[in-house]
Amino acid sequence: MHGFSSAPAWAQPRFPTNPFTLGVASGDPVPDGVVLWTRLAPEPLAPDGAGGMPPYRLPVSWQVASDPEFRDVVRAGASPATPELGHSVHVEVSGLRPGRDYWYRFRAGQEVSPVGRTRTAPAVGSTTPIAFALASCQAWAGGRFAAYRTMATEDLDLVVHVGDYTYEGRDDETLAQFRVNHAKYKTSPDLQAAHAAFPFVVTFDDHEIENNWAGLVSQPDNEASNEIGRFTQLRANAFQAYYEHLPLRRPQRPSGPDMLLHRRVDYGRLASFHVLDTRQYRSDQLTEAFPGGPQHPGVNDPSRTLMGDAQERWLFDGLDRSSATWNVVAQQTIMAQVDYDAGPGVSVNHDQWDGYAVSRNRFLAHVEQSRPSNPVVVSGDWHSAWVNDLRLDFARPETEVLATELVGTSISSGCGWAAAVKAARPNNPHVKYLNPDRRGYTRVRVTEQAMTADYRVVTDATDSTGPAVTDSSWVVQSGHAGAVPA
Ligand SMILES: [Fe+2]
């Protein structure tokens, strides 16, 4: 049960300082509601992971208003904050109107949170244009967070975050360690500003848990972690801390080492976001050669999977049933082939879809046969910006483009392999745009007729005051897979 707690009640909460140090957030909008988030943590970096909170449960009250001054409060209530969930609060608000801005805030004891703004999804059937930002890969060490500072000033309906929201500390293994790491990231005022400005739809990649984890298998170079149960427990701890720090709904609350993260978020009849989890159910990587290595014959083994059978069926069914003009597949790693071998051989990165070519072929063959409306894959992970044509046979550029791929650059994580991806470009004629040298995010405007992607870059990711500007703009016309310069 969501609010269950064995902790004693805290009758008269008093805090040494304002406990809303991690800000507020909202997420997963529907036409009549949204999930609101905060976490009480007067000492966010306390090493025991408790955020400076005593081991008591307490109610946190919340308000949703149609105006930023809270003159017109339209919904209000109270939700429990418990030590079992790190005193995080997840409120699923309903009864709101579609496509509207709302403002929200929390109160615990006498302390009041900052105000957040959110926006509900448009009504079912709506074709009103929307805009979203694609974000990923925000290493704390890379500078924090110029990209979010500019993003927070945009007019967006939502932010789609496709992973590496945090990077694990070298020895992170316990729940307390993962909590402290998340809290550290959340102390960034620029990240807090973006969360307070727009609802987020999030999915994790590898670094929220561990570099290149796959299913219940830790990295090969970290074999101690594969001792019976050890990585399973680490995964459970990382999942719980992830849930505790993000605006996720109740079905996404983890149960031990399992977490249901793939889900669908609809924006009227205009766009459907099919959000994937390509880590939890994947087969182990065939090799770890970096950035690429000779293609392993196992990439075509039909028993291998990137999504897992159940999620793959769910995705295909969802595409078949979708009535949206745009079907956005929001996921982690690059789907297009990236061949690093300038000669006749093929050299690829086996952590990406290239290491699971059989899964990519199943997806693109399904698109070819079932013809869902405007499939657009949005990706992250590789700390570099790309526009790619997706086709079944990348070696035959004359064949049909079946889907469009937009790969967003990192918010702040560095791209130490920029020279390798630039050198590989001539081997990959389906790559229309590549920029591994800048950090930022992608702003995507969606109408019935077209999807326009502006690749927004910051000049210096370590200077949080630097603005983001548009490096390049690409447009996909409805009915024509493949982006062209805007
Ligand atoms: Fe990353």
Image (spheres, grey):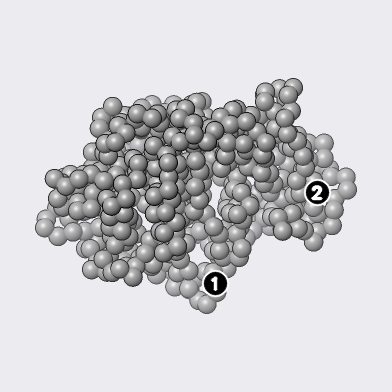
The residue beneath circle 2 is: 58
Q: Which residue is found at the position 60% from the left and 59% from the top? A: 254
Mark found first going from the N terminus, 2 or 1: 2
- Determine whether, in the image, residue 445 is placed left or right of residue 356: right
Q: Nearer the viewer, residue 51 or 75?
A: 75
Tell me which corner region of the image, top left, top right, bottom left or bottom right, holds residue 206: bottom left
Q: Residue flagged by tag 2: what amino acid is it?
A: Leu
Residue 360 appears in view: no
- Residue at the extreme left of the image, as rendered: 344
Q: Which residue is found at the position 85% from the left and 50% from the top? A: 10
Q: Position of residue 100 (x, y in %)?
A: 59, 28
Q: Which residue is found at the position 44% from the left and 56% from the top? A: 314
Marks 2 and 1, Cα distance to the nearest angstrom?
A: 33 Å
Within 10 angstroms of label 1, few (less than 14), some, or many (20 or more) residues? some
Q: Position of residue 437 (x, y in %)?
A: 32, 39
Tell me which corner region of the image, top left, top right, bottom left or bottom right, holds residue 84: bottom right
Question: Dot 1 lies on which element?
Answer: helix
- Residue at the extreme right of the image, as rendered: 11
Q: Position of residue 74 (x, y in %)?
A: 72, 30
- In the displayed structure, 343 sits above or below 220; it is above
The C terminus sits in image quarter? top left
- Determine whether, in the image, residue 422 is placed left or right of residue 177: left
Q: Residue flagged by tag 1: what amino acid is it?
A: Arg
Question: Dot 2 lies on which element?
Answer: strand
The residue beneath circle 1 is: 230
